[in-house]
Amino acid sequence: MKMPRMMLNLGNTGRQGYLEPPADICDLTVQWIAPRQAARYLRQVRTAWYRQDLADLLEPLTLIQWEVNGAQALYHPFPDIAVAITNHHVVGVLCGYMNELHRCFFISEIAFHPSYALYREIQTDVGRSLVEAAIDFSQELGFHGWVGCADDMHHLQLLRQLGFSQHDDFTYRKMGYFS
């Protein structure tokens, strides 16, 4: 099955660069990016998110880009990338892998638009949408909605707020929407 080409709409400004995200999150949708298009798509997201004074807040997105670059170099399998979009703006990115050993979809990193760094309620809404998409993907993989993450993620506090609980010394897990 051929995946549709997913390109970031940078608007009609005629320039590439930082785009201010919408102040309110409405009609938030999550889309999965085809593995072979992920590097280009994430470069466009980084261009749209980059602003000199907010550059330190792009570390989670940089880690996601490193995982995609490592997959392109055949160091490991391609990660699954989901993006949260509202009003044609990407406001969140989730990166994860199928984890056969723990029978779950393992979230390796979540990145939010740096302008939302101080708005925890917006991060929670975007994070919830991305985690729900990961739960749906876990069900498609046959893992009954199990999702997990490591204990050294950037946004672990947010995931704990969304219902993740400690599974062992290094892993947090959640099953389904209501746990």
Image (cartoon, helix red, strand yellow):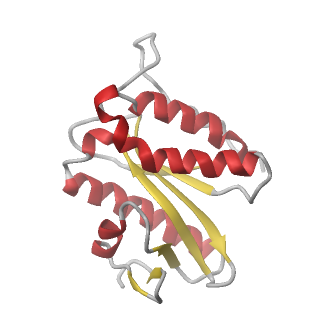
Farthest residue, direction bottom: 168
- Reply above or below: 58 against 135: above
Q: Position of residue 165 (x, y in %)?
A: 37, 84
Direction from residue 30 to residue 74 in the image, left or right: right
Q: Position of residue 64 (x, y in %)?
A: 54, 50
Q: Position of residue 143 (x, y in %)?
A: 61, 81
- Reply above or below: 24 against 47: below
Direction from residue 105 to residue 51 in the image, left or right: left
Q: Which residue is depicted at the point 21% across and 38% down?
A: 23
For residue 153, which quarter of the picture? Answer: bottom left
Direction from residue 104 to residue 17 in the image, left or right: left
For residue 4, which quarter of the picture? Answer: top right
Q: Position of residue 16 (x, y in %)?
A: 47, 17
For residue 38, which quarter of the picture? Answer: top right
Q: Which residue is depicted at the point 45% across and 10% down?
A: 14
Look at the image and tell me whether residue 84 can be seen.
no
Nearer to us in this view, 125 or 160: 160
Look at the image and tell me whether residue 105 can be seen.
yes
Q: Which residue is depicted at the point 63% across and 34% down?
A: 40
Nearer to us in this view, 72 or 146: 72
Image quadrant containing the C terminus: bottom left
- Reply above or below: 108 against 148: above
Farthest residue, direction top: 14
Direction from residue 167 to residue 18 in the image, left or right: left
